[in-house]
Image (cartoon, rainbow, N blue to C red):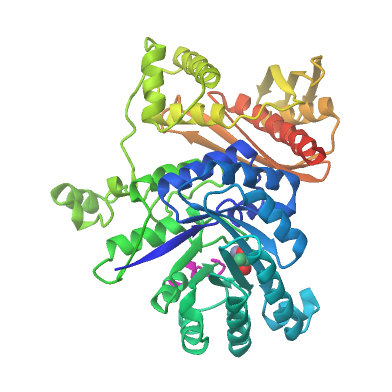
Amino acid sequence: MTTIKIFDTTLRDGEQSPGVNLNQLEKLEIAKQLERLGVDVMEAGFPASSQGDFEAVKKIADTITESSVAALARANKHDIDRAWDAIKGAKKPRIHVFIATSPIHMKDKLKKTPEEVIDIAVKMVSYAKSKCDDIEFSAEDASRSELPFLAEIIEKVIDAGATVINLPDTVGYTTPKEYGEMFKYMKDNVKNIDDVDLSTHCHDDLGMALINSIAGVENGATQVEGTINGIGERAGNVALEELAVTFEIRKDFYPFDTNLTLKEIKRSSDIISKLTGMVVPGNKAVVGRNAFAHEAGIHQDGVLKNAQTYEIITPELVGVTSNSLVLGKHSGRHAFKDKIKQLGFQLDEDKASIAFNQFKQLTDRKKEVTDDDLFVILMDVQTDIKARVQYKLTNFKVTYDSNNSPSASVSLETPKNEIITGEGTGNGSVESLYNTIEQLIEEDIQLTDFTLSSIGRGKDALAEVHVSMTVNKQVVSGRATAQDVLEASANAFINAINRVFIIQADEKE
Ligand code: KIV
Ligand code: ZN
């Protein structure tokens, strides 16, 4: 078996998914989970892109000890300096420098000749190497680059100090045969190629990210880059959980494995889905809600007789547990704290107390409090950044009657601690709430997406709402959970607005 290194870019390429923007605590929570999952490298972000991203990468680099922490940089000194400043506190830092190598990108985007691109790449890799030992070089759009040119630039950047060479299928265009052959070509034609790890990085525009990554590995790649749940630019990146489980289930066929702890997969998927708002489709391989459900009678009958008739992956392998009934109305703080630990959270005293109060409020309204409910409460409390400036919903009322437009009245506490109240209407209950809040806040707000899902399956399940919107042209997302759909909707909207103020305050610092 060859162990393939896993490079997770959920916090960088994944965070580039439309509508996703995570606050610092959310990124840190994801990073901690990726470490538990056992990724070899996590790309924490792109520090030159914003002050907020810089701070988040720095926080992750200062916290994570087991995995390498990588930061992305374009091939220029400013980006490399920012990347290094953000990750230099890491136990295992890596600078990831990239430049495009395909004819179309060099000519139309970079407006550089191939010779100029080689010159910049070599100079910037040596510059990065003067700061950090571990340097990854990515030839952006490698799969549409000319092979002899790619071989030439790779040989030179390895001489300049690169330790990992990544060959991305940036636009998800290539076929498995072509992608595999590109790796083979580099193995056969780059004299120093065995000095480095070769890496795949596949996007899923044609649904071939997994099979292309495997083709790369079969032809000499020793690192695979991807994200959890396959999130990422456009159609996303390869879903790392699919790769790791494929190698496990078909180890009779593929002589590869990874260092991932497979039973952490479900938890990783849940956390990332919740914090990014990118809901995992029910039929998604390995982590979808229906991945282990057998609907057809004939399948159920077979599974009861022998699970292996239709079940190739056991739920336990990826950490899917049955949703146990946990604490109730009479559970005390002590039992609650034990449960926090069992669910893998470490909350300080203040946060544990806030979470306990929220749990108690929930037991007043909900008969059965499950692990899923607690997970939501704990994650919300753990990742809540209290904004320096913040609007809070203090009260609201919605009147709905099927013959008239719904109307809402809303009271908000402003960042200056004043209470403001307003009324409005809309075509639906949620719209009437949003119109009213918009009038009260007086910012230019455009809602672009709204998703409602339930936590658990019962009638009294919690409602979770994710919104994407622009506030004064700034793209932002928000989320909230409540037992009532309208309350969750209003709070998700306000959460997004508050995030804009946090981002603005961070940028000023
Ligand atoms: O898809 C891509 O080419 C990338 C690079 C920046 C590595 O994400
Ligand atoms: Zn990418």
- Residue ID at (45%, 24%): 460
Tell me the quarter of the picture where residue 350 sits.
top right
Query: Ligand 2 lies in which image quarter?
Result: bottom right
Task: Relative to 352, say whether 276 is above or below.
Answer: below
In the image shown, does 60 or 283 lie closer to the viewer? 60
Q: Main secondary structure of the magenta part?
A: loop
Question: Would you identify the image quadrant in which residue 114 lies?
Answer: bottom right
In percent of width and height, residue 35 lies at 46, 46
Residue lying farthest to the front in this orientation: 130
Magenta residues, start to end: 203-211
The answer to whether residue 164 is seen in the rendering is yes
Residue 23 in the image, given as x and y percentages of width and height:
65, 39
| Residue 364 percent coordinates (x, y) | 46, 12
**Which of the two residues, 368 or 408, is positioned nearer the viewer here?**
368
Tell me what residue is drawn at x 59 percent, y 72 percent: 161
- Above or below 490: residue 138: below
